[in-house]
Image: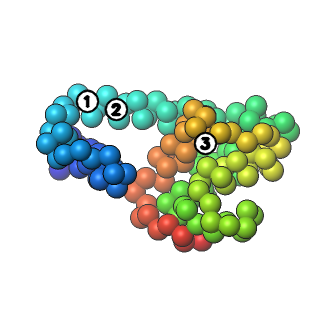
Amino acid sequence: MNIFIVWKRLLLACLVTTGLMISPAYADNFTKEDVDGWYQEYLSVVDKGRVAFTDASLGTNGVVCAQCHPNGANTHPETYPKFQKQLGSVVQMWEMVNWCIRNPLEGVDLSPTDPRMTAILSYIAHERRGVKMEPGKH
């Protein structure tokens, strides 16, 4: 299937699930260049997340995310939101990232809207692409 069609369908699905869709006709106004440009921007954020995963400045003790999670391994973003034992409740992925920053890295939480948090989450999701989504799975 043409990558343009795949991305167009993915964008439509995102718009529908977030309630932001105005009309299907609106999506027809996106060009292949639009979709390609957005994908390249996404990949640039993924690259920033890869850098953040090895950034000791997120903590105070020299530990980095990649020491426990090389290439985003064992992060399972496809299972969030889920009950997380360490936090004692159902949480979003960014909350678990902050738990790791606070504890193993001995750092300070990032805001959910911090560009570094977006980059970390994008990197993790990109590394796990293609894995079936199973929210709530432990």
Amino acid type of the residue that numbered disc 1 sits on in the rendered structure: Asp
Image quadrant assignment for residue 4? top left
Q: Say whether marks 2 and 1 touch (CB < 8 Å).
A: yes
Q: Can residue 16 be seen in this view?
A: yes
Mark 1 — residue? 34
Mark 2 — residue? 38
Amino acid type of the residue that numbered disc 2 sits on in the rendered structure: Trp
Mark 3 — residue? 112
Image coordinates for residue 95, horizontal then vertical, percent = 65, 52
Q: Is residue 10 visible?
A: no
Frontmost residue, 21 versus 129: 21
Q: Distance between the residues labelled 1 and 3?
A: 27 Å
Amino acid type of the residue that numbered disc 3 sits on in the rendered structure: Pro
Q: How far apart are marks 2 and 1 (CA)?
A: 6 Å
Regarding mark 2 in the picture, which secondary structure is present there? helix
Q: Going 73% across and 62% down the picture, which residue do you hit?
A: 87
Image quadrant assignment for residue 118? top right
Numbered tag placed on residue 20 in the rendering: none
Task: Specify which label sits upstream in the sequence, 1 or 3.
Answer: 1
What sort of colour scheme is used for the picture? rainbow
Horizontally, is 125 left or right of 105 in the view?
A: left
Regarding mark 1 in the picture, which secondary structure is present there? helix
Position of 81 relative to 55 (above/below): below
Regarding mark 3 in the picture, which secondary structure is present there? loop
Frontmost residue, 37 versus 17: 17
Q: Say whether marks 1 and 3 touch (CB < 8 Å).
A: no
Frontmost residue, 93 versus 131: 93
Q: Going 46% across and 30% down the picture, which residue do you hit?
A: 44
